[in-house]
Amino acid sequence: MLIQKRTSMLLSDFQISNLYKKNMAQNNNSLSSKKIKKERVVDLAITDKARGNAHDYYTNSKDVQSAISRIQVAENSLTSINDMLLQMTELCIQAAKHNVSPEDRHTISTEIQQLTVKLAQSTDSAKFNNENLFDDFSMESLGLSHIDVSTP
């Protein structure tokens, strides 16, 4: 009887141990599968964020390239405008001299008027993507609407 009791106790201990091991294995599997699922979720989140960052980088890169092109167009226009203003300044200095004949003054005045028209055209035609680069860049705002070189 004692042997039967001990045998049954050992059997039940063995069964309990097996059940415990089986439960632990299932728990470990479910924990590891939960862990894997969490890792996949984290990986997917990181991937989505990286895709978003790549898209933002691409968009920003296009915006920067567009801005650089816009600046280059404006710089070329301003260089041309600066050259015309320098020519007008030199003509005004020549006309300010007392020894210039009336015919020369008239020629200088005509040339200044032509430069003024060319300057106005340059400011009006300075566009990027059909958008004017110079708002209200009028001859009045530059102080060039009435240049009189008829007298020294």
Image (tube, rainbow, N blue to C red):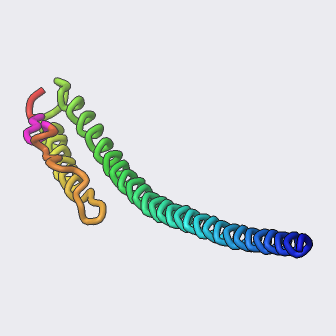
- On screen, residue 148 above or below 98: below
Identify the residue shown where x is 20% and y is 33%. 92
Screen quadrant of the C terminus: top left
Screen quadrant of the N terminus: bottom right
- Return the x and y of residue 86 as percentages of the image width and height: 29, 37
Name the quadrant containing residue 104. Answer: top left
Residue 6 is left or right of residue 78, and the answer is: right
- On screen, residue 125 above or below 101: below
Q: Nearer the viewer, residue 99 or 141?
A: 141
Name the quadrant containing residue 32. Answer: bottom right
In the rendered structure, which segment of residues is drawn in magenta?
143-149
Identify the residue shown where x is 56% and y is 63%. 42
* Helix, strand or loop for the magenta stretch, by majority: loop
Q: Nearer the viewer, residue 43 or 20?
A: 20
Residue 23 is left or right of residue 116, and the answer is: right
- Return the x and y of residue 55 as percentages of the image width and height: 47, 65
Identify the residue shown where x is 27% and y is 34%. 90
Q: Nearer the viewer, residue 67 or 46?
A: 46
The residue most toward the top is: 98
- Return the x and y of residue 52 as percentages of the image width and height: 47, 63
The stretch drawn in magenta includes residue 64: no
Q: Nearer the viewer, residue 11 or 116?
A: 11
